[in-house]
Image (tube, grey):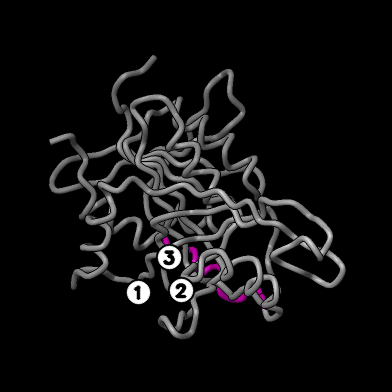
Amino acid sequence: MKSKYETDVAMLTVTTTEFRAVMHFHDWKAKTFAADEQIYDVASFENNGKTCSLVHAKIDEMGMTAAAATAMKVIYTFRPRYLIMTGIAAGVAQSDITEQMYGDVIVPDVVWNYSAGKFVSPDNASIVYGNIGFLPRSTSESIPEEIMPIIRKAVESNDNPCHVFIGPMACGSTVVASKELLEKQVYSQYRHTVGLDMESYAVVYAANHSSDPKPIPLIIKSVCDFADSKKSDEYQRFAAYSSCEFAKHLYENVLPMSDD
């Protein structure tokens, strides 16, 4: 069993748009292994005068199952210090908090599975959709507490190139394009949820439950639309780019790359 970190940062994306955004920021080289069909992209970056290692893997399909499998494979193959997922997400922040805009970055301090639960009679449910009731059994995973003060300080810094929201991110197995579902199933459980996607919970779970040395997971996604009937693909490229911009700012200037 490997007992120390062997890679500084590993990155994950899912969609082609997210993949292209990550590829824009570094001079990547493809790497493969004989017993693994996955294509990995490797590069390097400078962090406070130190040359650091970077690897990226594109997940084959959307959703938590594929995300967990790929995350675990990356963890055990490369033993990264940080496991960062970039890409796009739905903005869902309440208007009484701060209005979100396209391209705003979301960095969750906790991710939770809003789709876990049980369908029952509406008479026995806390959430009701017509003749169908739902009893939520949501589970959550937290970002390791030692890294969040560093992230918050980076967000507040004048060097930060992005507008960033920190708060809970909801994760589920389907795309949400319904204000009713958002109100009943998301806000009713985590009122201050600031984003919604389909993979974050699995990535953080994989990192938090791997063997030592565990990577520190970070989800860095940007608002490409909102969880309502007006969803579109218009701002996906912009959002994917801004999420990578903030991730790059973190691993090049902010995140510690040693145990000192």
Q: Which mark is residue 163?
A: 1
Alpha-carbon span between mark 2 and mark 1: 8 Å
Does residue 131 show up? yes
Alpha-carbon span between mark 2 and mark 3: 9 Å
For the C terminus, which image quadrant? top left
Under mark 2, the amino acid is Gly
Q: Is residue 83 located in the magenta-colored stretch of the structure? A: no
- Res 129 → quadrant: bottom right
Badge 1 local density, few (<14 within 10 Å), some, or many (20+)? some
Q: Does the magenta stretch mainly form a helix, a strand or a loop?
A: helix
Residue furthest to the right in view is 131
Under mark 1, the amino acid is His
Q: Which residue is mark 3?
A: 106
Q: Is residue 239 located in the magenta-colored stretch of the structure? A: yes
Nearer to me, 25 or 86: 86
Q: Are marks 2 and 1 in contact (CB under 8 Å)?
A: yes
At 81% from the left and 65% from the top, the residue drawn is 122
Stretch in magenta:
231-243
Task: Tell me the element at label 1.
Answer: loop
Find residue 58 and report its horizontal and vertical position in percent: 55, 44
Q: Which mark is residue 103?
A: 2
Placement of 111 over or under 71, stated as above or below: below
